[in-house]
Image (tube, rainbow, N blue to C red):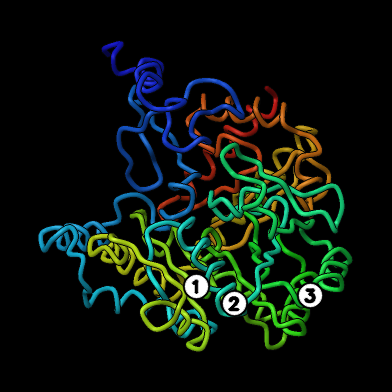
Amino acid sequence: MSTETTNAALFERAQAVIPGGVNSPVRAFRAVGGTPRFIRSAQGAYMVDAEGQRYIDYIGSWGPMILGHGHPAVLEAVQRAATEGFSFGAPTEREIELVEAIIEQVPSVEQLRLVSSGTEAAMSAIRLARGATGRSLLIKFEGCYHGHADALLVKAGSGLATFGHPTSAGVPAEVVQHTMVLEYNNVEQLEEAFALQGAEIACVMVEPIAGNMNFVRSSVPFMTRLRELCTRHGALLVLDEVMSGFRVALGSAQSLYAKLIPGFKPDVSVFGKVIGGGMPLAAFGASRAVMQHLAPLGPVYQAGTLSGNPVATACGLATLREIAKPGFFDALAAKTKRLVDGLETVAREEGVPLVGDCEGGMFGFFFAESLPQNYKTVMAGGTERFNRFFHAMLDRGVYLAPAMYEAGFVSAAHSDADIDATLEAARTALRA
């Protein structure tokens, strides 16, 4: 093997021409230390790095690869679409088919606009909510990530009535002055915020199942009260399902809450990842009445040269058709639960505190005695142990997210043998 193809050599080369050597920060391994793995290829449940090392993949491109890598039906659809043209800058029939497929599974959405990234979809959903309500104030929750738009790169102020301040250089304080950051799953704080400024709130944006502080569910009382308060005060409830959409259930996370909360539905929904099948594609949708505020029908402007890209829509449509087949999510959920239950069992046998949770093909685990309910409790400890565990698993051919605050993903391509191998690796790694 040439030294030019080692992960270390590629990382050194990358750092000379790409900031930090990566095109998205978490890939740099800064949270866990060490050298990032440069992936050469992937198939099924596996990725192979530049040095030829194969890994069982629990990142799945951060969620989209719900079928695994290189699914035959998806490959065939993408190859066929590519021969017809990469991009037209004009509408195609496949855009309609993909939107219809999404709407069919998500009753809260009557119309949908396709875009190219989750950040773009979340940013556009907020602009739409502000345009539809004529208000400016946005509420988000600490630990929920909605992309890197300026108004969303904000952390909590020192008190409830104090607005947040930027978490990134280059974001003026004036840009985030209309963003309020509250604690996830804190009903009392939510009620106080609406009591203070309910008439000014345009929307509340929340991940129903947070995936960027590991895997943390919004509680049923919290989601119930959130829906009630938005309705009472005329604010729009925006569910960011970029990660959970079509990942935790065919109807997305909102379908799970609809079973638990009578009449529950969001006003606006944001999707990404799975609906693109691994291609750059995302979307935001709502009722027809709300979506009519968008240009060219209304005054809220949003546009994109590559929105509804014909190759991306082919990939997404083929993926949605596969996951809509009977029994798909039952089988996927069973695999994921087997993995999480197995991790808890192995940890218990090794005398290590570990607790996990999962839904559909999305999971998380914490080196803790009980499941955290918000960002503060997620970050309370366990970092050093996670970092040791991560590298020990990586050395044994298991690729987990390189940070303790990221959720993991199981695909339909993972076999029982893959899960058994993962649990065996975990038993050894927990002793590290």
Image point (74%, 56%), residue name: 181
- Report the residue marked by disc 2: 255
Q: Position of residue 214 (x, y in %)?
A: 65, 47
- Report the residue marked by disc 1: 250
- Report the residue marked by disc 3: 198
Count of marks placed on residues: 3
Q: CA distance from mark 1 to mark 2?
A: 8 Å
Q: CA distance from mark 3 to mark 2?
A: 27 Å
Image point (64%, 65%), residue name: 205
Q: Earlier in the sequence, mark 3 or mark 1?
A: 3
Observer-nearest of 210 and 391: 210
Where residue 128 is drawn, which disc sits there? none
Image point (61%, 29%), residue name: 31
Instruction: Check the picture and name the quadrant holding the C terminus.
Output: top right
The amino acid type found where label 1 is placed reads Leu
The amino acid type found where label 2 is placed reads Ser
Q: CA distance from mark 3 to mark 1?
A: 33 Å
Observer-nearest of 93 and 19: 19
Image vertical order of residue 49 relative to residue 227, above or below:
above
Q: Nearer the viewer, mark 3 or mark 1?
A: 3
CB atoms of marks 1 and 2 within 8 Å: yes
Q: Residues within 10 Å of mark 3 (few under 14, many from 20)?
A: some
The amino acid type found where label 3 is placed reads Gly
* Secondary structure beneath label 2: helix
Observer-nearest of 228 and 261: 228
Quadrant for residue 383, please give it: top right
